[in-house]
C-alpha cells in the first residue's frame, strides 16, 4: 500500500499505527503541509479535499478520511481486530475514536489555524489558547469516559488496542506537541503509556518520521 | 429506543433519519441547546461530554457520537443496509460521511460559536462568515467527489441511501439554515433533493420537530 502522509499530520499517524498493528507493508510519500504541497495539482488528483492522509491499495481509487481508512484496513485485514465483536462494544470504541476525529482534531488542523491567523488576525498566543482549549475539552471527555466506565481495561476498551486507542494516541501526541497540561487526565495518560509500549504505536510516532528531526 | 435530541441539532437529525430508514420506533426527549439544558447534571449523567445526541437502547449504557450510533443501528438492524457490502465501497461511503462529521459540523456547533463570540469577541457577521466558510469548503469537497466519481448514483453511492446521504442531508440543511449559496454544487443539490423525496428524511427534518415552529 502507499500512504500519502506527513510526519506532523495526526491523521496520517493514526493510519500508520493501524498499518503497523496489522503488519501491512507500506511506503509513505510525504506531502509537506508546512510547504503547502497538499495544494498542488498532483496531490489534488489524489485527494480533491487537499488534506492528508490518502491511502492507495492496488489500482483502486484513493481512500480518504483517516477513520474510513482505519475501518477499511480492519475489514480487509481482520487480524488483529481493531474493533470488538459485540455491537454495543463497537459503538463505545467508535464513540471514543470520534471524540478525537470529530470533536478535537478538526478544530486544530492547519486550515483552521490559518483561518485564525489570516482572517481573524489572532496572534500566536490566542491561537495557542484556542488549540489548548479544544485539546483540554477532548481530554476531559476522554477522562470521564475512561475513568468512569467498566469496559475500560489496559486499553480504552478491554485489554487489546482498538480504533479508540489509535485515535487517543494521536490526541495525546497532539496535546503534548501544543504543551497542554496532562496532569488532570491520569486514566488517559495510563492508557497512552500502555499504547506506546507497543512497537506499532512507537514506530508510528510523528517525531520518528523522516522530516521530523530537521524540523524540530 | 430513546433519543436525546433537539430540533436544531444536526447530529440528532442524522440519527433520526437512520431510525426512520430502519423503521425503529423511538421516543425523542428534547435537550434544549439554546437554553443550555445539555449542561444540567441530569444530562451529564447520560453523556458526560454534554453534547447531543445520545441514544438509549434498552438497559445498556447510553450510546454517543452520531456516527457511532449510525453504525450501531446498521449492525443491529441490518435492513435496509446503510453501507454497501464491498470494503472499498464502504470506505467511500464512510469517507463521504466523515466530510460532514469531521470536517464541517465540528466547526459550527454551539460550543465553537460560543467561543467565537465570548472569547474571541467576534460579532454576528464575522461568526456567520466563519460558519459559511466551513460549510462552503465542505460543499466543494462533496461536489468534487460526487460529480467526479463513477460510483455516484441517484444517491451518494449507487441507488440506495447510505450513511453518506444521511450525513450529506444534515450538511445541506445546515448550509441552508446559515444561508450559504447552493448554486455552485449541482450534484450535491440533486442528491439532497432525492433524499428528501423519502419520507424517512423528510419527517426527520429539523424544522418539522416539536419546538422548531415556535423558535422560527
Image: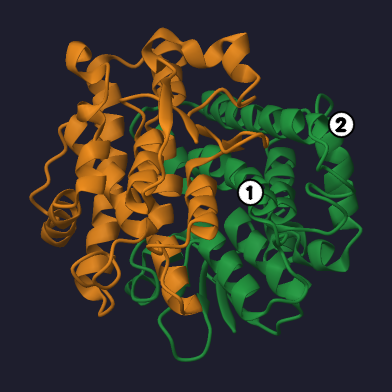
Chain colours: A green, B orange
Please, which residue is most extreme toward the left here?
Answer: B183
Query: Which quadrant of the view contains residue B208?
Result: top left
Q: Which residue is mark 2?
A: A186
Relative to residue A26, is residue B190 depicted above or below? above
Query: Which quadrant of the view contains residue B113?
Result: top left
Q: Nearer the viewer, mark 2 or mark 1?
A: 1
Near mark 2 (Cα within 10 A), the count class, few <14, some 14-19 or many ≥20, is few
**Residue at 56%, 47% in the rendered image:** A101
Where is residue A190 drawn, in percent x and y?
Answer: 89, 41
Left or right, A48 with respect to A154, comes to left
Mark 2 or 1, nearer chain start = 1
Q: Does any portion of residue A118 appear in the rendered image?
A: no
Q: Which mark is residue A42?
A: none
**Residue at 37%, 32% in the rendered image:** B108
Relative to residue A122, is residue B189 depicted above or below? below
The quadrant of the picture occupied by the N terminus of chain A is bottom right
**Disc 1 element:** helix
Left or right, B172 with respect to B33, comes to left
Q: Are marks 2 and 1 in contact (CB under 8 Å)?
A: no
Return the residue nearer the eye: A169 or A149.
A149
Where is residue A6 drawn, in percent x and y?
Answer: 59, 64
Give the distance between the C-alpha atoms of the residues marked 2 and 1, in whole angstroms. Answer: 18 Å
Q: Which chain does the residue under circle 1 lie in? A: A
Q: Does any portion of residue B183 appear in the rendered image?
A: yes
Where is residue A24 drawn, in percent x and y?
Answer: 71, 82
Return the residue nearer the eye: A205 or B212.
B212
Left or right, A127 with respect to A14, comes to left
Q: Which residue is mark 1?
A: A97
Return the residue nearer the eye: A33 or A159.
A159
Amino acid at each position: 500500500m502507499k500512504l500519502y502522509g506527513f510526519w506532523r499530520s495526526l491523521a496520517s499517524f493514526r493510519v500508520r499505527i493501524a498499518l503497523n498493528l496489522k503488519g501491512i507493508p507500506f511506503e509513505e510519500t510525504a506531502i509537506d503541509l508546512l510547504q503547502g504541497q497538499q495544494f498542488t495539482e498532483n496531490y489534488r488528483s489524489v485527494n480533491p479535499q487537499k488534506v492528508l492522509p490518502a491511502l492507495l491499495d492496488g489500482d483502486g481509487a484513493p481512500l480518504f478520511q483517516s477513520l474510513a481508512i482505519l475501518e477499511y484496513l480492519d475489514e480487509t485485514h481482520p487480524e488483529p481486530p481493531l474493533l470488538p465483536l459485540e455491537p454495543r462494544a463497537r459503538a463505545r470504541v467508535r464513540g471514543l475514536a470520534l471524540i478525537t476525529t470529530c470533536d478535537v482534531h478538526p478544530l486544530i488542523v492547519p486550515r483552521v489555524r490559518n483561518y485564525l491567523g489570516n482572517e481573524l488576525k489572532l496572534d500566536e498566543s490566542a491561537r495557542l489558547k484556542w488549540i489548548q482549549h479544544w485539546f483540554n475539552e477532548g481530554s476531559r471527555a476522554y477522562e470521564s469516559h475512561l475513568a468512569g466506565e467498566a469496559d475500560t481495561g489496559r486499553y480504552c476498551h478491554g485489554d487489546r488496542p482498538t480504533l479508540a486507542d489509535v485515535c487517543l494516541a494521536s490526541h495525546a501526541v497532539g496535546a503534548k506537541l501544543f504543551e497542554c497540561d496532562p496532569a488532570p487526565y491520569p486514566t488517559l495518560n495510563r492508557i497512552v503509556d500502555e499504547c506506546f509500549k507497543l512497537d506499532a504505536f512507537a514506530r508510528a510516532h510523528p517525531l520518528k518520521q523522516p522530516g521530523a528531526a530537521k524540523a524540530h
